[in-house]
Amino acid sequence: MPAPVIALGLDSMNADVLDAWIDAGHLPNLERLRGRGTYARQVNGALYRTENSWLTFLHGCPPEVSGEWGFQDYDPVHHRIVERSSYAFRNYAPFHALAAGKRVIAFDFHYGDVVDNVKGLQVFGWGPEGNVATCRSEPPGLLAELVDRHGYHPLFPDRDCDGSKVLQSYRVPSLYDADAMTSLRDCLVEGTKRRTAIILDLMQRGPFDLALCALNECHIAGHVFWHLSQQHPLGGLIQGEVAADYLRDVLAAIDHGIGEIVDAAPAGSTVVVFSPHGMQANTLDMNSMLFLPELLQRWNSGRAALAEGDPSGPVPPPRMDYRRHWREELWDLATPYGRTVLESPLVQAGRGDPLDWLPGHWYRPLWPAMRAFALPGYSDGLIRINVAGRDGESGVPVSAYSALCDELAELVGEVTDSRTGKPLVARVLRTRGHPEESGSALPPADLIVCWRDDVVTDVVEHPRLGRVGPAPYFRSGGHTSEGFCLLVGEGFTPGARIGVGQTPDLTATLLAMMGVAEQAHVSGYPIARAIDAECA
């Protein structure tokens, strides 16, 4: 019988930071594994980098092949975004469902859910990172049993675990509130201990071939504690109020848990520690969720609705008195005009909309009458053009589409950081040559705005549309496309480092270890073969 594989998703950890902390001796268990295993950086080349990071790994191919663009569906007729609580896996099953007869443990990975044709244990919604998550397990009572035995995740106390509920995300505390940061750190450290106990419990419930488990606390910590640990404009203003490196505290707790899991693993197990994406100073949230939707609204109406600044005067210094949730602080920045045309977050929250916190979604009542607008998203800027016939009855004519794409690309290319004058946009990608091109291989956005990774700001300038901000930062850490994997076990050379690969390479590797024949849609190349090729 082949040795089992334990794959631990150290979700959204910056590989450079991780390497530095291992080198410094802060993470002794990961240091031990790194010395015994093969290490590789991996790039997730998919667009919609946040929405598709885990999906590309689970499918083993990019969304252009799988036909699935994250966990949101856009209804162009009704101008409506629907956020699902899990990936749909419409065309391809996740790779762990392809190993017929293999016993699998699947626990809490990003936007996962119970799927058919998996023999073993599946548990989702105990301590997720996503905006919404399905609380479900197979067998059906397993999630409730684990909660009874090990407790709720501290971020999600006293929730219903009957297997039919959708769990809303934790409430991101204000980055400017040191006490709230400390409280969150304590919750994440305790959550890591309970998560480790659950993984050990699941491993002890009989033999298994693959344990695929996510360690979500580092994902949350990276979003919220980045400015307390790494380079960020807010960091120098608040780090003195916090006595420790909270991101490293959480990683130390995770490292301890990894040590317990490895020590309890069956003899001969292969251990894989990985992340399909990384973290850096956040260049995504403010740009895609606030600046882009507001600028497009101004371009369409000629009036400011949110976070209107005065471009005739100097840029105000950053404020440090924000203490409420981002949505409340931002809604206070709505103009009188904005309060008449935007849908308030309180109204959206009242009807249970999971996107009530995202300012770009407040513009939804305006979308049908706009020539183009920003689709709510979590990473790149997403622009949808209202095309007559494709997007309801009104809209711009098909003949105007190409010129409008060019105009919008030029418009966003003129946005600059008010504090430094640097442009925000790296490039603008056009997703279709004609508006009536359709099919699952195409995303709902007509234009994808890729932001520069080296510009982080709270206020932007446009030569014709004015200033947006200053506004409070939301999450100081944002996603990158670079992840990593560390593989320890038979067939992997101790201490080896190989060249940068693609995320689907790890998918192909895990499938090969489970004895699954090559899948036509999986674009990766097994890493053990890459080692052989480099050594040849």
Image (tube, rainbow, N blue to C red):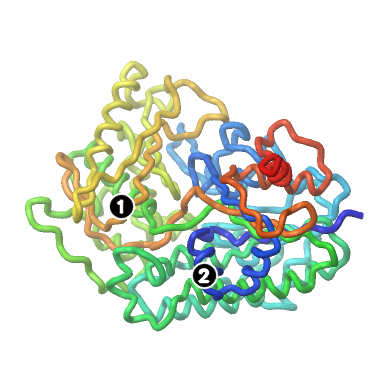
Q: Look at mark 1 in the image and give the residue it sits on.
A: 455
Q: Identify the residue at the far front of this view.
A: 536
Assign a secondary structure to mark 1: loop
Question: Crowding at label 1, few (<14), some or many (≥20) Cα neighbours within 10 Å?
Answer: many
Q: Note whether 175 is above or below 69 in the view shown.
A: below
Q: Foreground: 527 or 89?
A: 527
Judge from the rendering whether residue 60 lies leftward or rightward of residue 51; answer left or right: right
Q: Amino acid at mark 2?
A: Trp
Judge from the rendering whether residue 406 lies leftward or rightward of residue 192; answer left or right: left
Q: Position of residue 211 (x, y in %)?
A: 76, 59
Q: Amino acid at mark 1?
A: Val
Q: Is residue 336 visible?
A: no
Judge from the rendering whether residue 524 lies leftward or rightward of residue 277; answer left or right: right
Q: Residue, x 59% and y 79% (percent of image)?
A: 190
Q: Note whether 513 is above or below 263 in the view shown.
A: above
Q: Position of residue 326 (x, y in %)?
A: 35, 64
Assign a secondary structure to mark 2: helix
Q: Residue, x 55% and y 71% (percent of image)?
A: 251
Q: Foreground: 70 or 25?
A: 25
Q: Residue, x 78% and y 68% (percent of image)?
A: 202
The image quarter containing residue 37 is bottom right
Marks 2/1 in contact by CB < 8 Å: the verdict is no
In the picture, which quadrant includes the C terminus?
top right
Q: Which is nearer the N-term, disc 2 or disc 1? A: 2
